[in-house]
Amino acid sequence: EVRLIESGGGLVQAGDSLRLSCTASGFTFNGSAIGWFRQTPGKEREGIAGISSVTGSTYYADSVEGRFTISSDYAKSTVYLQLNDLKPEDMAIYYCVADLSGHFPTMKPMFWGYWGQGTRVTVSS
């Protein structure tokens, strides 16, 4: 069974940092692609970062480029998302996603077959 467990969300002030973790199980981690989406009420899910263990390539949405960093620890089957200089508009539920092909030609939600339960990030101004 594929499982993606997110952690690390919380309440912070604008300008602070958080590190989200996504621990994966039930599939070959080294051979997959992992991404992060976020969603706020009334808005569509936004794909904000992705990393391929096959190519090593990464992706960042314009909204987070330069502030967020995605990385992998293959020994722990864990992907991290470092969130720096958080802004009120970053407040959302953050979801870890996986594609077992190892590639992510698109960040559209329908491409990603596996989703975690989400972790909430709250940013106060």
Image: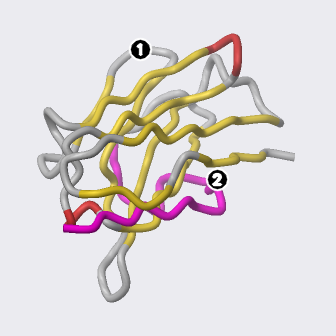
**Residue bearing the label numbered 1:** 55
Determine the image quadrant of residue 64. top left
- State the mark number for residue 86: none
Which residue is more in the foreground, 33 or 8? 8
Rendered residue at 42%/28% (across/down): 51
What residue occupies the far bottom of the structure in this picture?
42
* Residue type indicated by callout 1: Thr
Query: What segment carries the magenta color?
Result: 106-125
| Element on which disc 1 rests | loop
Query: Magenta stretch containing residue 109, yes or no?
Result: yes
| Element on which disc 2 rests | strand
The location of residue 79, given as percent across then percent down, is: 54, 30
Rendered residue at 57%/41% (across/down): 99
- State the mark number for residue 114: 2
The location of residue 74, given as percent across then percent down, is: 63, 14
Rendered residue at 64%/53% (across/down): 114
Query: Magenta stretch containing residue 90, yes or no?
Result: no
| Left or right of 52 in this view: 59 | left
- Between disc 1 and disc 2, whose residue precedes? 1
Crowding at label 2, few (<14), some or many (≥20) Cα neighbours within 10 Å? some
Q: Is residue 109 above or below residue 97?
A: below
Determine the image quadrant of residue 65. top left
* Residue type indicated by callout 2: Tyr
Which residue is more in the foreground, 90 or 55? 90
Rendered residue at 77%/32% (across/down): 27
The location of residue 54, given as percent across then percent down, is: 50, 15
Label 1 and label 2: CA atoms lie apart by: 20 Å
Quadrant where the C terminus sits is bottom left
Chosen colour scheme = secondary structure
Which residue is more in the foreground, 47 or 19? 19
Crowding at label 1, few (<14), some or many (≥20) Cα neighbours within 10 Å? few
Q: Is residue 36 above or below residue 37?
A: above
